[in-house]
Amino acid sequence: MSAVLDTQADDTTADDTPATRKPSPWAAPPRPVWEEEPSKAGQAGKGLVLTLACLGIVFPLWIVVVTSLQSKKAIDEAGGLVVIPKGITFVAYQELLSGGQVQRAALVSIGVTVVGTLFSMAVSVLSAYGLSRSGSLGHRWLLMALLTTMFFGAGLIPTYLLVQALGLTDTYLALILPSAVSVFNILVLRAFFMNISQELIDSARIDGAGDWRILWKIVMPLSRAVLAVIALFYAVGYWSAWFNASIYLTDQDMMPLQNVMIQLVQKQERPVGLSAQVNTGELSALAIQMAVMVMALLPVAVLSPFVQRHFKKGMLTGAVKG
Amino acid sequence: MSHSTVPRSRTEAKTPEKTPATDPERPAGDKGGKRAGKLSLRLRFRRDRTLILMTLPALLLVLVFNYIPILGNVVAFQDYDPYLSENGFVAIFESPWIGFEQFERIFADSAFWHAVRNTFVLFFLQLVLYFPVPIMLALLINSVVRPRVRAIAQAIMYLPHFFSWVLVVTVFMQIFGGAGIIAQTLREHGYEGFDLMTNPEVFKYLVTAETIWKDAGWGIIVFLAALSAVSNDLYEAAAMDGAGRWRRMWHITLPALRPVIALLLVLRVGDALTVGFEQLLLQRQAVGVAASEVLDTYVWWNGIRNQDFSYAAAAGLIKGVVGLALVLTANKVAHLMGEQGVYKK
Amino acid sequence: MTPNAASGPSRRKFLASTAVATAAVAGGMPLLSACGGGGKDDRKEGTTSGKDAQKILPAFVASNVVTPDIPAKNGSAAGFTKAIPTAELKTSVPKKLGSGGKLSVMAPFWGTPPKGDNPYYTAMNAATGVEVAWQNQDGVTYDQKLGAVLASSDIPDVVVVPGWNLNGRIPSAVNAKFADLGPYLSGDKVKDYPNLAAVPTEAWQRGIFGGVLRAVPMPAPYVTDIAPLYRRDLFEKKGYSVPKSPEEFLSWAKEATDARSKLWACDDMKWTAFNIFGVLSGSDKALWWNLEGDKLVNRIETDEYLEALEWTRKLYAAEVVHPDAVQGKAGGTPGNRLTAGEILVYNQNISDWWGKTAEQRTQNPDFDIAAFDIFGADGGDPTLWAVQPANIFTFVSKKAGKQQIKDFLALCNYCAAPYGTKEFMLTAYGVEGTDYDLKSGLPVKTQQGVNEVNGAFDYTGNPAPYIAYPDLPEVTRGMVEWQQRMGAFTKKSSFFGLTVTEPTRWANLADDFEQLEDDVVRGRKKISDVQQAVSDWKEKGGDGLRDWYRKLLDDNGGNGSTN
């Protein structure tokens, strides 16, 4: 019997056992019979390393979050980032959200990210598959053509003139098309595609499946993890991009979130003397900066469970490899 | 899910793999390549046209948005003034050609070579100290079986990637700086303070530490994807054969990661001349130019900052050529070691 | 391993943050704002002064609409300490000069630009008779956007170029793409625009690019803008008196520093050191030169330069400088360390005097900041060098029609209205009742005003330098009087007031000196390294540049001492 069916059978039996109907996500799932008892020392070591690594991140994160919630007075007294909070105030977040600019810009960003990611994924998956068969006609030349662009960049002026000549300035396409293809991402996808059992693809071909069908029915379902990763890379790229918008857009109402965030930070720390205005209230420029930082982390927190779903150990992908 | 087809195909795949060779339109994997060499171009095109078609959209985008503006790099051989003419593009035809003068200027500058040296030192340091960290972290995370713990640890580790460099440096300063938490605590107890942030001697390690803190967690993501492709059956079979925990990692887990590691390694080597631009420019004053100047900051300081387009283009070309040479060499080495690398010959 | 995002965007992000840092000290420490070179074409390099300039410059007709409480003296700004009731506001633009035409204006903007149809913009458009379509560009990436837009054939009607963006090929673009305003402003023609006629001549002279009057400048006081600021409240509390000589400062600093309690005497004092030791101004490259005897001397060649560095080095070596200041740019802003009470003295643009006072007023009523007088190297009177009297420029595209240029000047004339006029109130505070309210006689911006009256009309015309904080009359007085006292010791170097475009091949020759200075004062390099760098500089073109400047001086007569 095939290995795939074995695993499936295992899963069903496990689910049917009354005792483990709904295992707590905190608990370890039942260990397979063949796996040895973990050593106490090993467990402890692992726990220690993980805890330290996480603490090393959580502590700075704490500083950032706390500072975003502090009054100007508290921040002035600390002379910068605040470690121990003195009261809590949400003025920084209120300021960020009060103008309505952020909400509108967030919609723009979501739109650009969703459309851009779908477009980039389509283009990248197709080309990664198209290049995944060594020996296919011209595949080395095509690969080289892509690879070269990783090393040779273009100056801002030629790029700007091109985008302008194509009539893309002041359109959202200017935020998507120039950065739609990441060769790095294509190469990673391709590496994963090439790792898929060739026998599987060959047999599908014997069954009369063409390349489109193989890609759709075999390669993509078997590559869910890497597809999730690459989609995340693209999404993060589109979400955090701001330079293209600042160069190619002139209409303030079209600006994506990152640009508006940058503007809001600048508004607080505007060069004194250029404009006779200074912030005298509760609000500290630093708190705004940190609030912007926190809001930048939000999408990650939202997205990461979706990606992690695809990282389940020993999914069917591997089963067909053996 | 379309897995219903999977078991069937797999059993059928047991049949001899030579079958497809009888049909020129159906190549059979790697071996097909060599045989395909004998096929006429027309037949190969007919066979691979779908694949080529699939590559076209990406190719078209790259052609328009990369190659056309890259042509603008001819200004490296000019004394380019984009404002000589009505349009900066037309100005290319009106700017004087000066041959390799920009390149000579760069190569004759001792500061350039110093920057190159710093770049390679940092690159090797990061290759040794940084590159393995995400792999080890991925293995560690992968060995955690409790789903909630695993999810939380993963999510936390991604976060620093989204910190700006300014913030990363500030946070390090607050902890390790001369007025940082550690130094200040020492002083309060009557000891001497110290300042890790402004010491040119330890700067390269500081930079590496900052990089690890910021990006190692994010770097695990690709490896986790690769690990998720490893079948439990393999582990089970190995365990049945008496392989212990470590042997299983060595013989199953690591081989599964090898293609990805090789690919990322090759690409990283190709990118050797790029080490932390923003991060280093930020800390330039703190430790001085001698310790912090790398190729990218050198080019920024001498070319981009002054909008010296020809100079920047020349430096970019040098960097590109070296990068391409490095990646091809690294790729070759990967082949010799039996890895796929970026592409196979 | 940051795919997709790659290094491109992050690099740009950084470029951006440095740009803002530069802007933040606009006029403060604009050594970064190197004066760039022009094309090989000789007409574009150099400068214009003397007789040639006289033919081009607009006539000066002082404005007597409102008399300042503290008149300008010795190159200071004029001070206005009182709010003027709405009923008593004067009128400086009796007749609307704009034709109702449209103008697109590209300008840097730090903050969130308001919507285009807001009450403030509408009122301004109606009052000036010019329909402005703002293209407010992110101040952070402005230099890059500017470089790209100027290279395209599609340039906005009006473009603002800050002095710190005038590097590389931008001066060449200025000459190629922007119109000659001479036919509208030279000599008596400016009298059509009375508020522009009241702009000081030396500011106008800075607007001459490539031998032609191209820019409406933003006038600034020529007294050094870097002031040594100190916590007057903490000085009083601890019984310190303000140091009167370099030695006194050092010994006071050693006494005042208490690292254990997280207190350091000062921040980086390099720029004040330059002023104390009488080093030629480092703000604009042309100001680095001065005719001494019969020879043009560059600031980096002087003993004063080395002495200033040596003294600053002593401060660092004595560990009286805050460790975060040693970090430089990455260490955060010195102003925050001052308000936190971690340092007692720092140097910054003098506008921080008002900025910090206003900022701390509600939070920390005890907070008191002031600038102390710069002392000389021997404890006597200092020798100070004048900075450029204008450093932000507004241009009109060559493609603009006559009427558009006239509309632009009408707009500038309106915005250049002096304090105490209706025009000034509208430009600076917006619409009464909407953008600001009068509270016990003082204009106070509403939330709407804060969001709308937000810097857009900052560059399209400005009156002669003024300081007007009616809510903080003491600070206003303190600032103006400091400028006047320092102005009395201020000399003008040979190329003061001139906009000089250096030949491209030498334009960046001295760029590395600033980072060398930073290395020396922090003890990473020696004074002898500076001397070595100076002799390298001479060989690589410093002497050539000297001859080039000498020729300029001979041809044009420089600013002379009469200017």
Image: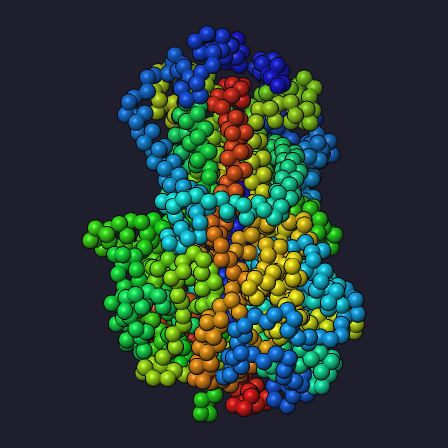
Which one is in front, B66 or C169?
C169
The residue at the point 32 percent across, 82 percent down is C379
Picture quadrant of residue C382? bottom left
Q: Is C422 on the left-hand or right-hand side of C473? A: right
How many marks on residues?
A: 0
Q: Is C542 on the left-hand or right-hand side of B205? A: right
- Quadrant including the C terminus of chain C: bottom right
Q: Is the residue B212 above or below the residue B295 in the image?
A: above
The residue at the point 56 percent across, 31 percent down is A228
The residue at the point 40 percent across, 60 percent down is C365
Which one is in front, C447 or A255?
C447
| Way the structure is coloured | rainbow
Query: Looking at the picture, how far across and down is residue A258, in whole percent?
Result: 58, 47
The residue at the point 67 percent across, 83 percent down is C58
Query: Looking at the picture, how far across and down is residue C6, in whole percent?
Result: 54, 46
Q: Is C155 on the left-hand or right-hand side of B312? A: right
Q: Is C175 on the left-hand or right-hand side of A306? A: right
Res B230 visible: yes
Picture quadrant of residue C554? bottom right
Query: Looking at the picture, how far across and down is residue B150, in whole percent?
Result: 43, 27
Picture quadrant of residue A190? top right
Res C333 visible: no
Query: Looking at the picture, how far across and down is residue C555, in whole percent?
Result: 59, 89
Farthest left residue in view: B190
